């Protein structure tokens, strides 16, 4: 019981420190004269951050499985684009994306997941969800293989609407406390602007996303997962989880 309380306390601390320290100093708004090419780049990079990402191996959690995790992610940015849309005019080279992810195992090798994101110092929030099915359950000799369908959307930014949906196939194999994994999939995204200053065309595209990672179980109910995602824009994630 003490270990469990301590683990929840640590997750709480990570979540608190990941939240915005100064709300509104980097709010996103589209300025007059913002061009179509730069708009497309902005949508592409935001879509990378918005798209649901479970940061987890392929293996099913099982009917009793429950996982709550705090993720600190980083998405590479084109600062020449972002300097034009953030309110303080000074964008970082990477967008820090804190996420809260909750996943629950169901019968028949099905897992459900939901995520909530709040980007520090901005008006960006995101919500997403996933349904995942184990195609191969995995065993001592066989890797686990899964198929995932997911969707997510951008909230909080009045000037922009972004939604994503996608499909991923993943594979993983545990070895003692380590579970390396990889996945590949396609993410479709739709982006549009909602201002009276601009008449930009909607940007609807897709991107291939591949991921590699490793989950490290270092306590009976706690794990650390490190993952790198390769797409049009690269991103990196670190997840601390409680696994039941």
Image (cartoon, grey):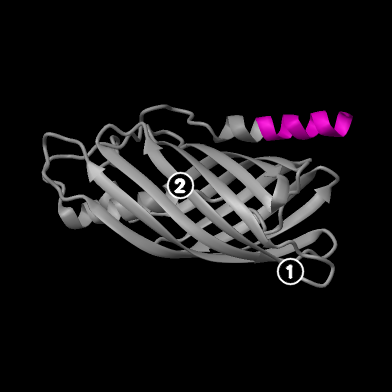
Question: Viewed as shown, does residue 159 lie left or right of 210?
Answer: left
Quarter of the picture containing the N terminus is top right
x, y percent for residue 19: 52, 32
Q: In which quarter of the image is residue 193?
A: top left
| Element carrying mark 1 | loop
Quarter of the picture containing the C terminus is top right
Residue at image coords 28%, 35%: 87
Which stretch did the figure color magenta?
1-12
Residue at image coords 70%, 53%: 109
Q: In this view, does 129 lie above or below 27?
A: below
x, y percent for residue 93: 40, 53
x, y percent for residue 240: 68, 44
Residue at image coords 70%, 44%: 105
The earlier-in-sequence mark between 2 and 1 is 1
Q: How far apart are marks 2 and 1 (CA)?
A: 26 Å
**Mark carried by residue 240:** none
**Mark carried by residue 143:** 1
Circle 2 is placed at which residue position?
151
List the single residue furthest toward the front.
108
| Element carrying mark 2 | strand
Residue 144 in sight in this render:
yes
Is residue 34 or residue 169 the one in the foreground?
A: 169
Q: Is residue 161 above or below residue 235?
A: above
- In the image, is residue 35 part of the stretch drawn in magenta? no
């Amino acid at each position: 019981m003490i270990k469990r309380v301590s683990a929840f306390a640590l997750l709480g601390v990570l979540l608190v420190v990941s939240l915005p320290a100064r709300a509104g100093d980097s709010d996103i708004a589209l300025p007059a004269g913002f061009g179509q090419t730069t708009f497309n780049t902005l949508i592409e990079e935001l879509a990378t951050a918005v798209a649901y990402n479970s940061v987890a191996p392929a293996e099913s959690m099982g009917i009793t499985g429950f996982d709550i995790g705090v993720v600190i992610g980083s998405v590479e940015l084109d600062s020449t684009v972002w300097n034009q849309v953030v309110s303080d005019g000074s964008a970082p080279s990477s967008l820090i994306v804190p996420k809260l992810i909750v996943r629950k195992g169901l019968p028949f090798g099905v897992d459900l997941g939901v995520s909530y994101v709040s980007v520090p110092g901005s008006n960006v929030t995101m919500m997403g969800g996933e349904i995942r099915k184990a195609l191969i359950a995995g065993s001592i000799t066989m890797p686990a293989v899964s198929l995932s369908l997911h969707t997510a959307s951008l909230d909080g930014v009045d000037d922009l609407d972004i939604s994503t949906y996608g499909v991923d196939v993943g594979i993983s194999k545990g070895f003692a406390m380590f579970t390396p994994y990889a996945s590949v999939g396609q993410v479709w995204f739709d982006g549009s602007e909602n201002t009276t200053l601009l008449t930009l065309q909607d940007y609807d595209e897709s991107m291939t996303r591949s991921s590699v990672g490793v989950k490290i179980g270092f306590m009976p109910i706690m794990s650390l997962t490190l993952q790198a995602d390769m797409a049009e824009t690269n991103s990196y994630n670190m997840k601390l989880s409680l696994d039941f």
